[in-house]
Amino acid sequence: MGITKTQIFNEKQNKLATILKVLAHPARIAILEYISKQKACICNDIVAEIGLAQPTISQHLKELKNIDLISGEIEGKKVCYCINLKKWKEIQQLLNSFFVSTHSNCC
Amino acid sequence: MGITKTQIFNEKQNKLATILKVLAHPARIAILEYISKQKACICNDIVAEIGLAQPTISQHLKELKNIDLISGEIEGKKVCYCINLKKWKEIQQLLNSFFVSTHSNCC
DNA sequence: AGTTATTATCGTAATATTGCAATATATAAA
DNA sequence: TTTATATATTGCAATATTACGATAATAACT
């Protein structure tokens, strides 16, 4: 049905899945990589850098903002998007503990 | 259009996104957690454990198999699913290097 | 106020994903 | 060989995601 039965899973599983879903798109990975490479706060040069239309980029940025992974500061006409380091590390930690605690013990 | 423009992204970005997409579902997270908890190779007790229909679980297992994250060994009537540790660690490494190399330097 | 530049939102088309009933396949047991 | 059990596949309905044109909103400049 295209709808995920979140009710039957626990909070941790749903949280992890939600975060991974946001990261699971090459455009959003590219956006994060691009933002991180910039010396200064850079705005929608992202549109020029990545070959997607402006509304599409804006939508991807919104999804990254929704989970608080990036924040956008308005600077005149432009908006400056930055990675939220605190959240970034929190997610890194979450993922790492998932990988560490999950390991095969058969076959 | 529901279709991702993979052509405009590099191989690494697409690979990472593909892997994350597979992991980005609570059922598949739950399946991996469940398999890892079992002492022996356990098969579709997964269906009983997780509250989804057998075809649905079978489909999720297939997706995990597609990226070689788990392997299924036939044991009589049953199939024994195990985490592929080599791939597991490879993905962990891939994710970790993404997180380490991507960090904010503005705002 | 009018113009221009930047970003966000809306509406919509195309495609993907999720979930399941029905069915097929395979193996073991009777 | 029939029956029962375990798993895979098919087909389909419901919903989600991706992408973009059109348009709105905002802000700087004239």
Image: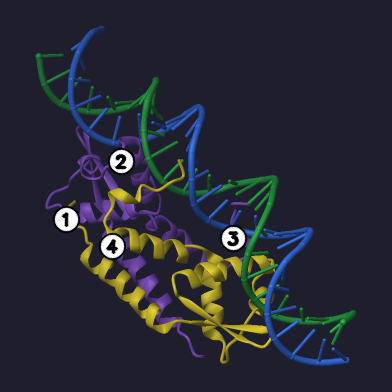
Chain colours: A purple, B yellow, C blue, D green
The amino acid type of the residue labelled 4 equals: Lys
Q: How far across and how far down the image is residue B90, in percent?
A: 34, 77
Query: In the shown orientation, is residue B84 left or right of residue D11?
Result: left
Residue drawn at 25 percent across, 70 percent down: B97
* Subunit that carries the residue with mark 2: A
How busy is the neighbourhood of tag 3: few (under 14 within 10 Å), some, or many (20 plus)? Answer: some
The amino acid type of the residue labelled 2 equals: Leu
Foreground tag (1 vs 4): 4
Query: In the shown orientation, is residue B18 left or right of residue A71?
Result: right
Q: Which residue is mark 1?
A: A37
As drawn, D6 above or below B14: below
On the question of residue A11 being in view, the answer is no
| Numbered badge on residue B12 | 4
Foreground tag (2 vs 3): 2
Alpha carbons under labels 1 and 3: distance apart: 36 Å
Q: How far across and how far down the image is residue A18, in percent?
A: 47, 59
Residue drawn at 59 percent across, 60 percent down: A6
Residue drawn at 25 percent across, 45 percent down: A50
- Relative depth, front residue between B21 and A34: B21
Query: In the shown orientation, is residue B81 left or right of residue A87?
Result: right
| Numbered badge on residue A6 | 3
Q: Which residue is mark 2?
A: A52
Q: How far across and how far down the image is residue B95, in percent?
A: 32, 69
How busy is the neighbourhood of tag 2: few (under 14 within 10 Å), some, or many (20 plus)? Answer: some
